[in-house]
Amino acid sequence: MKILTVEDDNMIREGISEYLSEFGYTVIQAKDGREALSKFNSDINLVILDIQIPFINGLEVLKEIRKKSNLPILILTAFSDEEYKIDAFTNL
């Protein structure tokens, strides 16, 4: 199984990748939205996606991936504002 991990914080990205690799998953890392979209392909089975990433934010990355695939996407966010999260996902 191939997992694309998109996170701009190096320590978090590396931690997630290392943990998943221990269980035999192939992890592809991206530090920003542009890199995520360039690395995304049909071999990816799951995306772990931060919302606040440079260049192209996570919600825009999500929209672009959804145009190509319906694979599972796990969203990570530090936002605690419930209204922001509801509004963000309503407009997808």
Image (cartoon, rainbow, N blue to C red):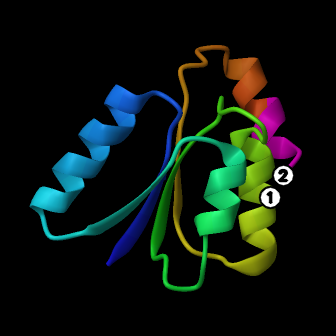
Task: Residue lying at the far right in this picture: please name it.
Answer: 91
Where residue 48 appears, x then y in whole percent? 47, 52
Name the amino acid, label 2.
Answer: Leu
- Front in this rendered view, residue 71 or 81: 71
Q: Residue at x 70, y 32 (%)?
A: 54
Q: Is residue 28 left or right of residue 11?
A: right
Q: State how far apart marks 2 and 1 are (Cα).
A: 6 Å
SS label for mark 2: loop
Precedes in sequence: disc 2 or disc 1: 1
- Residue 29 position in % (x across, y down): 44, 53
Quarter residue 24 falls in: bottom left
Task: Based on the picture, tell me whether residue 68 belongs to the magenta stretch.
Answer: no
Q: Position of residue 72 (x, y in %)?
A: 52, 67
In the figure, residue 86 lies in which quadrant? Answer: top right
- Position of 11 with respect to 86 (left or right) is left
Residue 42, placed above or below residue 3 = below
> Residue 89 has which mark?
none
In which quadrant will I find the N terminus? bottom left
Q: Which residues are magenta?
A: 87-92
Is residue 57 positioned above or below 66 on the image? above
Q: Report the front residue among 73 and 7.
A: 7
| Helix, strand or loop under label 1 | helix
* Image location of residue 76, percent across then percent down: 51, 37
Q: Residue at x 72, y 67 (%)?
A: 65
Secondary structure character of the magenta stretch overall:
helix
Q: Is residue 32 above or below residue 17?
A: above
Residue underneath mark 2: 92
Q: Which residue is mark 1?
A: 63
